[in-house]
Amino acid sequence: MERKDFLGKIGGSIAFTCVACMMAACSKDETTTGGTPGPITPTPAVILAVNLSTQLLLVNDFVSDKGVIVVRTAAGNAAASFSAFSNVCPHQNNPVTFNKTTGSFSCATHGSAFSITGAVTKGPATTGMGKLTVEISGTTLNVK
Ligand code: FES
């Protein structure tokens, strides 16, 4: 093989290899940018934060703020000891309130009522209240 032919063939191989390396490097950057392979799921934002050192100390204690009602349903500071709901009535979007004495929710606009689990106990609403996620971090309860 002539030197000229040899250099021509090896030069083409090197160029091909460099392009392949660059493409691999670029695609590698794209897949590692998010830190975790696969689709990125957005973390829900905290709607309401409650200090459990000073609030929600007893069963049926509640906080109503920022369109959320969160109620202590059991002792202990586990997420399962609390329920949180949107305060928007599923009937026609008016505000729902919590009654600490009866442990139930009601909407004064048309009289719908809901149990502590958010289920409808009296219409005209036909669906339950919108349940939200409760997470505990130390002595802070976060509603998402
Ligand atoms: S809006 Fe609540 S009962 Fe109608």
Image (tube, rainbow, N blue to C red):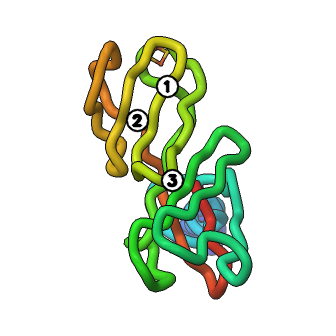
Q: Residue furthest front?
A: 101
Q: What amino acid is at disc 1?
A: Cys
In percent of the image, x 48 and y 50: which residue is there? 132
In percent of the image, x 39 and y 74: which residue is there? 74
| Residue 102 placement, left or right of 70 | left
Q: Return the x and y of residue 23 as percentages of the image width and height.
A: 60, 59
Give the residue pinned by disc 3: 100
Q: Return the x and y of residue 98 as percentages of the image width and height.
A: 52, 44
How far apart are the two marked residues, 2 and 1, measured between alpha carbons?
A: 11 Å
Of residues 118 and 42, the one nearer the viewer is 118
Of residues 29 and 108, the one nearer the viewer is 108
- The answer to whether residue 25 is seen in the rendering is no
| Residue 81 placement, left or right of 88 | left
Of residues 1 and 119, the one nearer the viewer is 119
Q: Return the x and y of residue 39 as percentages of the image width and height.
A: 47, 54
Kind of element beneath mark 3: loop
Q: Earlier in the sequence, mark 2 or mark 3?
A: 3
In percent of the image, x 64 and y 87: which residue is there? 138
Rendered-image quadrant of the C terminus = bottom right
Q: Residues within 10 Å of mark 3 (few under 14, many from 20)?
A: few
Q: What amino acid is at disc 3?
A: Lys
Numbered label attached to residue 144? none
Numbered label attached to residue 129? 2
Q: Please say if 5 is above or below 86.
A: below
Of residues 130 and 73, the one nearer the viewer is 73
Give the residue pinned by disc 1: 107
Q: Residues within 10 Å of mark 1 (few under 14, many from 20)?
A: many
Disc 1 CB within 8 Å of nearest ligand 1 atom:
yes
